[in-house]
Amino acid sequence: MSRAKRRDTAPEMLLRRELHRRGRRFRVVMKVPGNNRRTIDIAFPRQKLAIFVDGCFWHGCPEHGTSPSANWAWWQQKLAANAARDRDTDQLLDEAGWSVLRVWEHEPTDDAADRVEVALAIVSG
């Protein structure tokens, strides 16, 4: 697990490049308000919009998520803890007045960027 990339993953970089190409400016790896350890993948602080690019395995994608057969019980607990942490992070951001958008790593980049544009339009009024 120590070798698993935590930031600047390929899907995240593709989305950041596409948003930048569309003229959007944002912050990367911004701390979640109220928590010193968690970070937002792509943040629009002025609009208070947090974007997370979630990996299918680590975050339990209903379409592509898998569970290893070796050491099954440990992995079930680990992946459930990841999902609980995601929900807690969403709640922390919501309490701080932020909107959260979660994008799966398998989503086409253009579709994900379109979803971000829609979310920005909504939060901007």
Image (cartoon, rainbow, N blue to C red):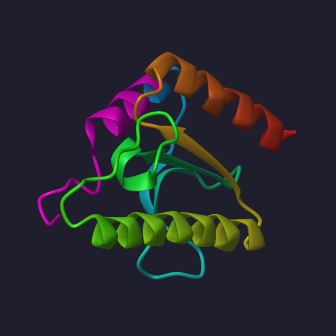
**118 part of magenta stretch:** no
Q: Residue at x 51, y 71 (%)?
A: 85
78 in relation to 101, above or below: below
Q: Is residue 79 at all visible to an observer of this figure?
A: yes
Residue depicted at 55% across the width and 70% down the height: 84
Which residue is at a point 48% across and 37% down the rendered structure image? 104
Residue sitting nearer the eye, 109 or 75 = 75
Q: Is residue 81 left or right of residue 97?
A: left
- Place of residue 40 in the rendered image (x, y in percent of width and height, measured from the top left): 48, 59
Does residue 55 appear anywhere in the picture? Answer: no
In screen coordinates, is 85 left or right of 69? right
Q: Quadrant of the N terminus?
A: bottom left
Image point (57%, 45%), residue name? 102
- The residue lying furthest to the left in this view is 3
**94 versus 107 height, above or below:** below
Q: Residue furthest right?
A: 125
Residue 74 picture location, percent across and down: 29, 73
Q: Quadrant of residue 13?
A: top left
Q: Quadrant of the C terminus?
A: top right
Picture quadrant where residue 120 is located: top right
Q: Closer to the camera, 117 or 107?
A: 107
The range drawn in magenta is: 1-18
Rendered location of residue 94, percent (x, y): 74, 66
Q: How many numbered circles does the render carry? A: 0
